[in-house]
Image (cartoon, rainbow, N blue to C red):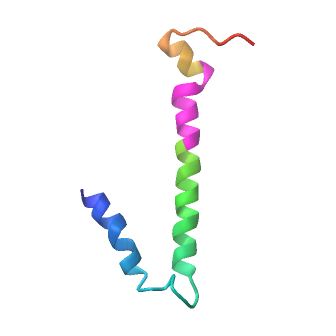
Amino acid sequence: MHLLSLALSLPLALDGESAGGSSTGLAAISVVSMIFGWLLVAGLWFFVFSAKARARRGEKDPPD
């Protein structure tokens, strides 16, 4: 719950910066969230969909 409250309070911490003027804080948050998203996708591929992960689970590779 603490992480959720932190995420919800983030727009308040920007103090309306995204409504007008320079939006440097919003840009930084966007870049961090994109990097986190790509790391999440890479981790999902590595731990679930890679051939090494399938071999650990004992599954066969799909036919080509």
Residue 31 percent across, percent down from the top left: 58, 65
Q: Is residue 14 above or below residue 43?
A: below
Q: Is residue 29 left or right of residue 13?
A: right
Q: Is residue 17 left or right of residue 61?
A: left
Task: Name the residue: 50% across, 15% down.
Answer: 56
Residue 46 forms part of the magenta stretch:
yes
Task: Name the residue: 54% across, 51% down.
Answer: 37
Q: Which corner quadrant of the image does residue 9 belong to?
A: bottom left
Residue 12 percent across, percent down from the top left: 36, 79
Task: Name the residue: 59% across, 8% down.
Answer: 60
Q: Is residue 21 above or below residue 10?
A: below
Question: Which residue is situated farthest in the bottom direction here?
Answer: 21
Q: Quadrant of the image for the C terminus? A: top right
Q: How many marks?
A: 0
Q: Is residue 61 left or right of residue 1?
A: right
Task: Name the residue: 58% across, 40% down.
Answer: 42
Residue 49 percent across, percent down from the top left: 57, 26
Question: Which residue is situated farthest in the front direction here?
Answer: 19
Q: Which corner quadrant of the image does residue 4 belong to?
A: bottom left
Residue 62 percent across, percent down from the top left: 65, 13
Q: Closer to the camera, 18 or 42?
A: 18
Q: Is residue 37 above or below residue 27?
A: above
Bounds of the magenta segment: 41-51
Question: Which residue is situated farthest in the left direction here?
Answer: 1
Magenta segment, prevailing SS (helix, strand or loop)? helix
Residue 24 forms part of the magenta stretch:
no
Q: Quadrant of the image for the N terminus? A: bottom left
